[in-house]
Structure formats: structure tokens, C-alpha cells
Amino acid sequence: MTLYTQQSKNITRTWLLMSIFFVIIIGIGWVFSRVYGNPVILYFFIGFSLIMNFISYWFSDKIALSMAGAKEVKHDEMPELYHIVENLCITAGLKMPKIYIINDPAPNAFATGRNQDNAAIAVTTGLLERLDKSELEGVISHELSHIGNRDILISTIVVVLVGFIATLSDLFLRMSFWRDREERDNWLMFFIGLVAAILAPIAATLIQLAISRKREFLADATGALLTRYPEGLASALEKISQYPLALKRANNSTAHLYISNPFGAKSVNNWFVKLFSTHPPVEERIKVLREMSV
């Protein structure tokens, strides 16, 4: 598989993902309408799902940056970081993305945006403090690879859609407990509604995992080729993964965006967390990168 076929696949996956989420949301709306005996609910969900797809396409990057507490910085504020990004963009043939800083001691970074014309890279203050120049270049090249591989759109859209489905599920579960027993005349539909409300966020999470894990290996490889120094990124991943504490604003909706698990090294030891991790094992990523150096 070449880089260009992967880019084409990412575009196809974006529209497929939006279609799948549209169907899931409509399905939840249909169950809601049957359980509560009100067809207007279904029409509301159809309209609202269309609006959410529109918002996720055009504004999901701003939502993701806001959730992370990222602030944009200009050249004069951080010239060294700006020059690293600029030089790597020239090498990669990409347009200069906006640069954001997250005030957090945990080292991490992510890229977001619809395309390279509207791309942004966010790095934490902890990343800048803990990495040397070659390691920082490795991280930036990884994030630029996400932009070049055209997978930032699909990963950013997931932030909004997964969060939206989880909210709908939680809303239904809360409403179901407030219903009077006399209202539960259609127990079968009510049971189906409960099952759908529980399974919907799980399905959304599984889609999120399937999207995230493969793209990290590709971005690692592409980034290493960009800097021609795989050890820089491998060393950076070691330092990032060894930091014990989570990002202050780490949450499940945005976890897949980051270059490494944002919940800290302590969480990785939990087998359940490993099962639902949005990232492949960092040991595997480091091993592949160091094999490229041989």
C-alpha cells in the first residue's frame, strides 16, 4: 500500500464514518420515538444528526482545541518551535499549520483540522520542556504526517460524533428511570431502547479504536522518513510514555488525537484500559522505528 492509496482510503473512510454515525443516530432516534410513542422525536433526530455532521465537518477542530485548552502562538512568542515546524513543512511540501500550546506538564501533542489549509498542531509545555530538538522534530514530523496522510479530518470528526452518541445514550438512560411504570406499556421496545442506549457508545468507541491504531503506525513511519532519523521519534515516545500522570484535560473523546496515551503511564498497566486503548502499544511503535534505523 502506498502513501497515496492510504490518503485516498482516509477520504473514503471519512464519508463512510459520517454515514455510519448518521445511521446510528437515526437508529437511536427511531428507538426513542417508538418507546415514547412520538414520531416527532425521529424527525428531530434526523435534523439534528444532519446538523451534527455539518458541525463536526466544519468546526470539530476548534472544538477539539478548545477541549484541550490550547492557545494559539505566533512566531515571536516561540520562534524555535515555529522554525522547527516551518522547516519540516518545507521538507514535507506542506503548508504551515497554526501552532497551539497547551499549558500542561504532561508531554504530548496532536494535529487537527479539515485539511492542510486549515490544519493545526498543538503541543504541551511539558513536551517542550522534556524533549531535545531531535526528539521534538520527531514528534512534529509525526503530527505533520497525520496532516499529509489526510487522516486529521476523520480523527477530529470522531471527537464530536463519539461524544454526541455518548450524550444521547446517557440522556435515554436517565429518562428511562424517570418514567412511571404505567407508561412502560411497550416493555419490548423499552428493553430494546435500553440495549441500544448501552451498545451505541460501545459501537462508537470500537469505531474510534479501529480508526486510531492503524494510523499511528503509518504516521510514525512517514514521520521517520521525513526527518530521516527514526531514533528521534522513538526516544520521544519513550519519554512521553514514561510520564506517570494524565493530561489535565484528558478525556475519552479526544484521547485518540494525541501522539501517545494522554492518561499517563499509570493507566497503561490496567488490562482493561489496554483493551480499549486508542493507541497501539508504545513498545511496538518504538521497536518498528528502531528497526528502521538499522
Image (cartoon, helix red, strand yellow):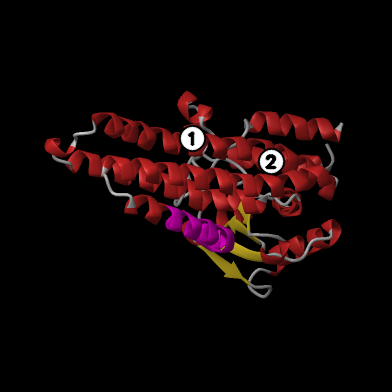
What residue range appears in magenta?
46-64
Residue 268 image offset from top left, x and y in percent: 51, 31
Q: Residue at x 38, y 43 (%)?
A: 30
Q: Is residue 153 above or below residue 180?
A: below
Q: Residue at x 49, y 41 (%)?
A: 263
Q: Circle 1 sits on which residue?
A: 203
Residue 53 image offset from top left, x and y in percent: 53, 56
For marks 2 and 1, the one nearer the N-term is 1
Q: Circle 2 sits on which residue?
A: 215
Is any part of residue 196 visible from this angle? Answer: yes
Number of numbered tags placed on the structure image: 2
Residue 44 is left or right of residue 270, and the answer is left
Q: Residue at x 36, y 37 (%)?
A: 197
The residue sitting at the bottom extreme is: 76
87 within the magenta span: no
The amino acid beneath tag 1 is Ala
Q: Is residue 183 above or below residue 70?
A: above
The amino acid beneath tag 2 is Arg
The kind of secondary structure the magenta stretch mainly shows is helix
On residue 155, the disc is none
Which is more foreground, mark 2 or mark 1? 1
Asked which secondary structure carries label 1, the reply is helix
Q: CA distance from mark 2 to mark 1?
A: 19 Å
Quadrant, the C terminus = top right
Asked which secondary structure carries label 2, the reply is helix
Residue 92 is left or right of residue 284, and the answer is right
Compare residues 222 and 36 and report the one nearer the observer: 36
Residue 40 image offset from top left, x and y in percent: 33, 54
